[in-house]
Image (cartoon, rainbow, N blue to C red):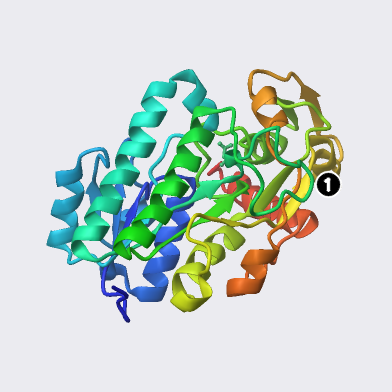
Amino acid sequence: MYRKHSKRILVTGATGQIGSELTLELRAKYGGENVVAAGHKRKPGEALLSSGPFEFLDTTRKEDIEKIVKEYDVDTVYHLAAVLSAVGEENPQNAWNINMGSLYNVLEIARQYCLKVFWPSSIAVFGPEAPRVKTPQNAVLIPRTMYGVTKVAGELLCNYYFLRYGVDVRSVRYPGIISSETPPGGGTTDYAVEIFYEAIRRRHYTCFLRADTVLPMMYMPDCINAAITLMEADPSRVRCRTSYNVTAMSFSPAELVAEIKKYIPDFVCEYKPDFRQKIADSWPMSIDDSEARKDWGWSPKYDLASMTRDMIDKLSKRFVEGRL
Ligand code: SER
């Protein structure tokens, strides 16, 4: 069932927060023409369009995915298209249909065409019954959001396709992802990205979480590195086929504000918690990712200080050039 060399990669959700940067990295690594970017709602940016093939794709339509897989002779899928936690709570039925429908389609096609699959799970698989500090890999999974429910069900489905059909599917549970290129779309951890844009543009931000809400986070270069390292690992090292805990740092809005103020001393942050506070309160504060470290050598590079420095540096440059 395992293929030795990747010929062609399909990235779904390629216009999203992770997809837009992961696609460019995969193209740099494997050649632009070998990585097909597929997006749905968001318009693709210039970098995505000029560096390789782009297709509009609704991943809830199995035959549409299949068409692209055949046309480009795809052998690996990074399936990132999904509805995130906050948007998912506005329309849980839609979150179930999109997240489960599209993953089921991808796994079915992977079974039929012998594809290797990367699919991101999330810290949202955990609920308040799990230990909130250093949450272990095998903690109880009773999420309170529909997004979390689809991630738990998705992990079980991935594991099933691996055991039953030998589909080489690999997954990590991402924490909140911080990035400078494409904003996230409707998650509970989005504040940690928005705050940088607002600090630079207006020196003021209204945060939708309480100042002391600690959540696990990761900077985009580590996020991309986790996906590619796991996908390149020898199959014998991928012992977990549900999903691996991974993390890089944990901080609260207050701690992030203090770090940003080192660069922008007059930055002011107000706090007006909304419905997302309840979601954050049901999630872990920190994650035990020792199994990923041990099995396939996971090791993040960025902490709160180095991530903040890089974000401020990148976004300030864009602001000065009038592109923020
Ligand atoms: N960042 C995601 C969210 O907030 C968690 O996976 O929904």
15 left or right of 105 in image: right
Q: Is residue 159 visible?
A: yes
Counting the numbered discs, the total is 1
Q: Residue at x 40, y 60 (%)?
A: 23
Ligand 1 rendered quadrant: top right
Q: Could you say which is closer to the camera, residue 85 or residue 54? A: 85
Q: Is residue 92 above or below residue 314?
A: above
| Viewer-nearest residue: 142 or 216 | 142
Residue 292 location (% of width, % of height): 62, 66
Q: Residue furthest bottom?
A: 4
Q: Secondary structure at mark 1?
A: helix
Question: Residue furthest toward the front?
Answer: 164
131 and 214: which one is in front?
131
Q: Position of residue 184 (x, y in %)?
A: 52, 39
Residue count near mark 1 (Cα–Cα under 10 Å), binned few <14, some 14–19, many ≥20: some
Q: Amino acid at mark 1?
A: Glu
The image quarter in which residue 247 lies:
bottom right
Above or below, 94 against 84 in this view is above
Label 1 sits on residue: 259
Q: Residue at x 45, y 69 (%)?
A: 231
Q: Position of residue 278 (x, y in %)?
A: 68, 23
Looking at the image, which is closer to me, 51 or 146?
Answer: 146
Q: Quadrant of the N terminus?
A: bottom left
Is label 1's Cβ within 8 Å of ligand 1? no
Q: Quadrant of the C terminus?
A: top right
- Residue at 33% of width from left, 30% of height from top? 97
Q: Position of residue 5 (x, y in %)?
A: 31, 80
The residue sitting at 59% across, 39% down in the picture is 124
- Left or right of residue 117: residue 132: right
Residue 300 visible to an observer of this rendering: no
